[in-house]
Amino acid sequence: MTSLKIIRLIYCLLFISIIAIFTTGCFTITDEVSIKKNGAGTMTTTVDFSTAMSMLGMFMPDSVKEGLDTGLDEVVDRDLNAYTSINGITNVSITKPDQYIMRISYDFASIDALNKVLNQNKNAAGSILGGSTKYKRKGNKLERVTTVEFENGESPIAALLEGGDEQTAEFMKMMPPPTYKIVYSMPNNVKKATIKGMAAKTNKQTNTYEVEYNVFELLKGNQKLELKHCLKY
């Protein structure tokens, strides 16, 4: 499951309550990609909206909370079986360290195996966003390209946020935005990084390179979006 699919999952599970979660700006999604010299590695994705739920829980009906819990449990069971069936994917672990934190981790034997995991069911019916992520590796160069296309020309989440009242808009300006972070751990020091497609915060520390996006910015577009990362190490 890609991180954009996780964003879709949150939306589908919470329905009306997603507006509150997005406007509080209190969730984070982190992809951690660790690459070895032979192209194998480990991928860990963590989605954490515990802070948002602690703020909003008192306002949510019990039925919504129960639906969210059940939905996350179903994702854990379904994806565990799906991941273990892919050749080259091992040590699959899908856990909930906290009630509203989900962590997915697995080892991949090759970049091809990683791409198979990231792009399974990418065109499933009912998706809020259509998208795909693909990695390429050649020598000491790693490239990641994520392509996102919005159904009907606009993200439904963006339409809902933009259609809010003035009070909601002002509240959003006051709150920190939700974030999506990609952390690359390379076998050697990162010599050069090129980030294209959208403004992002970056942080380089020897062999680790971080890219951080504002989720609001990712979801407010109305056309095809391509995010491209190229790291030389």
Image (tube, rainbow, N blue to C red):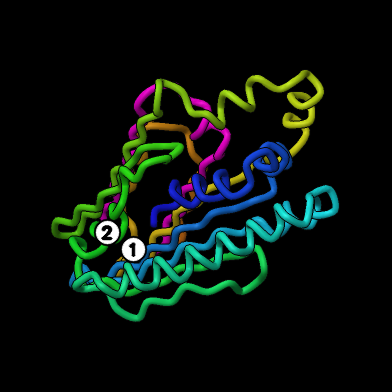
Q: Amino acid at mark 2?
A: Tyr
Residue holding disc 2: 233
Residue at the image point whose x is 47% and y is 33% from the top: 199
Q: Which mark is residue 155?
A: none
Residue under the point 45% across and 58% down? 31
Asked if 34 appears above or below 225 in the picture, the reply is below
Farthest left residue? 139
Neighbours of disc 1 within 10 Å: few (<14), some (14-19), many (20+): some
Q: Is 226 covered by the magenta stretch?
A: yes
* Above/below status of 25 relative to 88: above
Q: From the viewer's side, name the closer residue of 151 and 88.
A: 151
Residue most extreme to the right: 58
SS of the residue under disc 1: loop
Asked whether the residues under the numbered discs 2 and 1 touch, taking CB atoms below 8 Å apart as contact, a structural biologist would say yes
**Residue under numbered circle 1:** 189
Name the amino acid type tagged 1. Asn
Residue 146 appears at what percent x and percent y?
33, 42
Looking at the rendering, the stretch of residues picked out in magenta corresponds to 207-233
Q: Is residue 64 above or below residue 186?
A: above
Q: Position of residue 162 (x, y in %)?
A: 63, 21
Image-based side of 162 in relation to 83, left or right: right
The quarter of the image holding the C terminus is bottom left
